[in-house]
Image (spheres, coloured by chain):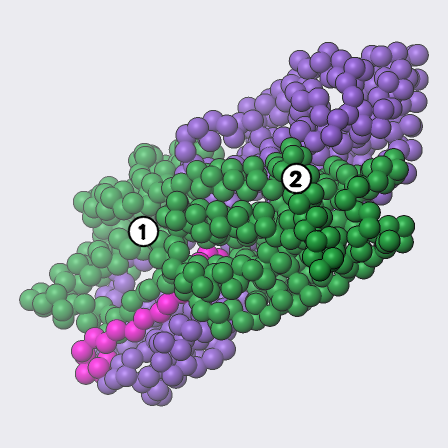
Chain colours: A green, B purple
């Protein structure tokens, strides 16, 4: 059992190194601990409420006032001012006092009274797409209600049910599933959590490898490495990372969603069976990548920025079905792509292990491939001079 | 003149250092270009089309098949599969095969004909916000259309004209104008800030690395000596080749956005050139500022990384800032990307006169003052401190 003793020796020594290195601690512990808190605080409100909106009411009628009053009463839109004309309204939008404009034409009430269709125009500043959604959905909702009432007056004596049937011979119902509030935090945070696991690991492992390479250049030998073969070193080192990240992952993927009340309908067995290959794939991915770390810090500037493209490549924002094949292939190199998709579906959509089979297989394949690469890297690094 | 010569000599030394190490080429040229091409081609469609969706058609009549065909012909929706029941459609959603499905219960057609108001429903995977909401839009439109078709047919039968029928069915209609981005192009909405954001992040990191790597490799004294220990000259010389490279990258970024992809540029190119110039210099200033704040390559880099990554959510280009807690609204003033985004909205997107952006421009310039406060400290660090692990 010499190999086991050797592996444990490497493990114990590396664990001590990692836990005593403040640079590594930052990436392995502090960032994963604090970053989700920051994000949760940022998206605390989940959605955009009360978008400041101005009204140009050229109709000046009871009906138009009723319309604006009801729009104001919705949660998404707040009427902050009634403007005299379009110029004044535009000025308010340009100075960012308001983001949307509702224009009610002169003949609004007259048209309705004389049974002509009338059009209310909505304008939205496109610096944010959520303003657009807010004003459109609020106004549509109000107009549907008012249309129903107007029709009631057209068919005197009709019951509510008759009017409704007349308006909607076929009624419809919309059911948003899983993220029922369409909340922004619920949408983005799970993806960010999985990304944090991969990226902090890459940075921490890169930092450790960079340091080692600096020492090699200065001819400082690591005492615990001598007399061990590459397999033992690889097992020892990778299990240090794995051990630390099992704890980090429990916090990130279990505690954080519960703490911030994000949708979490997972079965813990499913989550466990999925997270193990994810952490394993990330571990060997990090070790493989760390072979190009020249010094302690170079990894930070090379791999932080890539988190942002990777978040998009996962298909959490721009849909995966519409990602060009080339970038899809690129995204398959990274565990985060499969990790994010699987985790979101398990956590928010209650997917079972069979439902995420594709992602699960991919992560195991990545684990094997990167394990192979890690072995080759270690063989090259430690194979020659130190194998004793 | 001597000063200029010194600066020039330091700049040449820096240029040599930059060319000698792959990390500079990677972070200043390859990485940004790859990121630019990634984002613009990823969202090249503008609005994702043909999103995979399913149907559960328990009724299966000529009418319902017509409805489904219509839905399939909508631009954002592509019906990929018919499911026997809601449970299996839901399963397909959990497997990530579809983003939404449309459910028509048995007897819908019969009930509609006999005026008993049946209900159809549609379900979206709201965890995927963008495809979920686009599928919602198509399916809602389809539902309105299907209902309207039955209603119109009834009214036509009673001798109504089309205008009259519409006035009865929908007396008040909404018409939406998405000002300056009528097609709701997501690439316009995101890339305009994502790309400069990547530049900003890399500028801060590279500048810090380039300064403190001198401390680590114990060449800082040699560098400062070339400027007679004058930190201002030393920094100008060092940053000159970097600024030049970043300005070229910034130009390339603007060329890609407004020249190749033809994104809205209602202000003309000059205000955006100014905006990019300000962003690059403010990011550099922040980088130097962080160096002066903490005398350690690693800690200064960590600070810059935190600041840089946080810039993306806090600048409010995806999730609007009005919904942030007040503390963060205040804090966002300290992020150059926030000001870049606001200047972009006023200028390129909305084409307002430049004076609308004066405050943001002034703050971007004020960032340049930040490192000045700490120059003495930075000089001391570089001359006296040693790199420690």
Q: Secondary structure at mark 2?
A: helix
Q: Earlier in the sequence, mark 2 or mark 1?
A: 2
Q: Distance of mark 2 from mark 1, alpha carbons?
A: 61 Å
Task: Look at discs 2 and 1 and give the one toward the viewer.
Answer: 2
The residue under label 1 is: A139
Q: Residue B201: x, y in percent?
A: 67, 37
Q: Is residue A387 above or below residue B300?
A: below
Tell me which chain the residue with mark 2 is part of: A
Closer to us: A351 or B177: A351
Q: Which mark is residue B1?
A: none
Instruction: Write the start and end of the magenta stretch as one range.
Output: B111-131
Q: Quadrant of residue A52?
A: top left
The residue under label 2 is: A16
Closer to us: A53 or B12: B12
Say which quadrant the C terminus of chain B sits in: top right
**Residue A352 visible from this viewpoint:** yes
Report crowding for label 2: few under 14, some 14 to 19, many 20 or more residues within 10 A (C-alpha).
few
Q: Is residue B135 above or below residue A246?
A: below
């Amino acid at each position: 059992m010499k190999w086991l003793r050797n592996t444990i020796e490497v493990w114990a020594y590396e664990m001590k190194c990692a836990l005593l290195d403040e640079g590594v601690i930052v990436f392995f512990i502090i960032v994963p601990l604090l970053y989700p808190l920051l994000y949760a605080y940022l998206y605390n409100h989940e959605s955009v409420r009360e978008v400041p909106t101005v009204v140009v009411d050229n109709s000046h009628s009871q009906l138009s006032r009723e319309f604006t009053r009801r729009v104001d009463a919705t949660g998404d839109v707040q009427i902050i001012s009634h403007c005299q004309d379009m110029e004044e309204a535009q000025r308010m939008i340009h100075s960012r006092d308001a983001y949307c404009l509702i224009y009610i034409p002169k003949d609004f009430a007259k048209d309705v009274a004389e049974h002509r269709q009338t059009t209310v125009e909505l304008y939205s500043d496109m610096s944010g797409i959520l303003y657009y959604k807010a004003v459109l959905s609020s106004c549509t909702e109000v107009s549907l209600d008012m249309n129903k009432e107007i029709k009631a007056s057209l068919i005197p004596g009709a019951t509510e049910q008759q009017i409704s049937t007349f308006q909607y011979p076929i009624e419809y119902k919309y059911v948003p599933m899983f993220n029922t509030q369409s909340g922004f935090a619920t949408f983005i945070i799970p993806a960010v959590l999985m990304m944090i696991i991969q990226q902090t690991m890459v940075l921490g492992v890169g930092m450790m490898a960079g340091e080692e390479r600096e020492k090699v250049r200065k001819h400082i030998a690591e005492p615990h490495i001598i007399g061990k073969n590459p397999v033992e070193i690889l097992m020892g080192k990778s299990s240090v990372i794995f051990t630390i990240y099992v704890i980090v992952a429990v916090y990130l993927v279990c505690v954080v969603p519960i703490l911030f009340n994000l949708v979490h309908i997972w079965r813990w067995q499913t989550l466990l069976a999925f997270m193990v290959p994810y952490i394993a794939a990330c571990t060997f991915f990090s070790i493989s990548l760390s072979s190009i770390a020249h010094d302690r810090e170079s990894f930070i500037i090379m791999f932080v920025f890539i988190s942002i493209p990777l978040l998009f490549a996962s298909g959490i924002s721009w849909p995966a079905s519409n990602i060009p094949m080339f970038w899809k292939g690129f995204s398959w190199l990274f565990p985060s792509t499969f990790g994010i998709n699987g985790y979101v579906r398990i956590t928010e959509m209650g997917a079972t292990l069979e439902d995420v089979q594709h992602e699960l297989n991919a992560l195991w394949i990545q684990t094997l491939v990167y394990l192979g690469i890690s072995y080759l890297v270690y063989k090259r690094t430690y194979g020659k001079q130190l194998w004793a | 003149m001597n000063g200029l010569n010194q600066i020039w000599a330091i700049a040449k030394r820096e240029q040599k250092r930059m060319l000698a190490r792959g990390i500079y080429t990677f972070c200043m040229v390859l990485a940004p270009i790859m990121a630019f091409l990634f984002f613009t081609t990823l969202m090249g469609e503008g609005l994702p089309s043909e999103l995979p969706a399913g149907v559960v058609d328990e009724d299966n009549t000529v009418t319902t098949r017509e409805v489904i065909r219509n839905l399939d012909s909508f631009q954002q929706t592509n019906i990929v599969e018919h499911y026997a029941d809601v449970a299996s459609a839901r399963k397909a959603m959990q497997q990530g095969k579809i983003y939404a499905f449309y459910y028509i219960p048995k007897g819908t057609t019969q009930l509609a004909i006999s005026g008993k108001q049946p209900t159809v429903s549609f379900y979206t995977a709201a965890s995927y916000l963008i495809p979920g909401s686009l599928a919602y839009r198509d399916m809602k439109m389809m539902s309105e259309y299907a209902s309207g078709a039955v209603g119109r047919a009834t009214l036509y039968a009673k001798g109504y004209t089309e205008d009259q029928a519409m006035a009865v069915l929908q007396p008040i209609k909404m018409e939406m104008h998405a000002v300056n981005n009528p097609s709701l192009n997501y690439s316009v909405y995101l890339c305009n800030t994502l790309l400069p954001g990547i530049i900003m992040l890399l500028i801060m990191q590279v500048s810090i690395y380039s300064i403190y790597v001198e401390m680590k490799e114990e060449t800082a004294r040699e560098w400062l000596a070339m400027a007679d220990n004058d930190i201002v000259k030393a920094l100008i010389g060092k940053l000159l080749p970097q600024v030049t490279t970043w300005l070229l990258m910034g130009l390339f970024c603007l060329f890609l956005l407004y020249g190749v992809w033809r994104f809205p540029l209602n202000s003309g190119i000059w205000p955006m050139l100014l905006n990019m110039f300000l962003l690059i210099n403010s990011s550099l200033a922040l980088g130097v500022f962080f160096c002066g704040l903490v005398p350690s390559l690693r800690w200064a880099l960590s600070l810059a990384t935190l600041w840089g990554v946080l810039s993306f959510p806090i600048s409010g280009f995806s999730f609007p800032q009005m919904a942030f807690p007040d503390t963060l609204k205040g804090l966002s003033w300290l992020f150059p990307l926030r000001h870049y985004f606001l200047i972009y909205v006023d200028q390129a997107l909305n084409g307002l006169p430049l004076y609308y952006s004066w405050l943001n421009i002034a703050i971007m310039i004020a960032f340049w003052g930040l490192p000045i406060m700490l120059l003495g400290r930075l000089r001391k660090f570089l001359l006296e401190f040693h790199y420690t692990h």
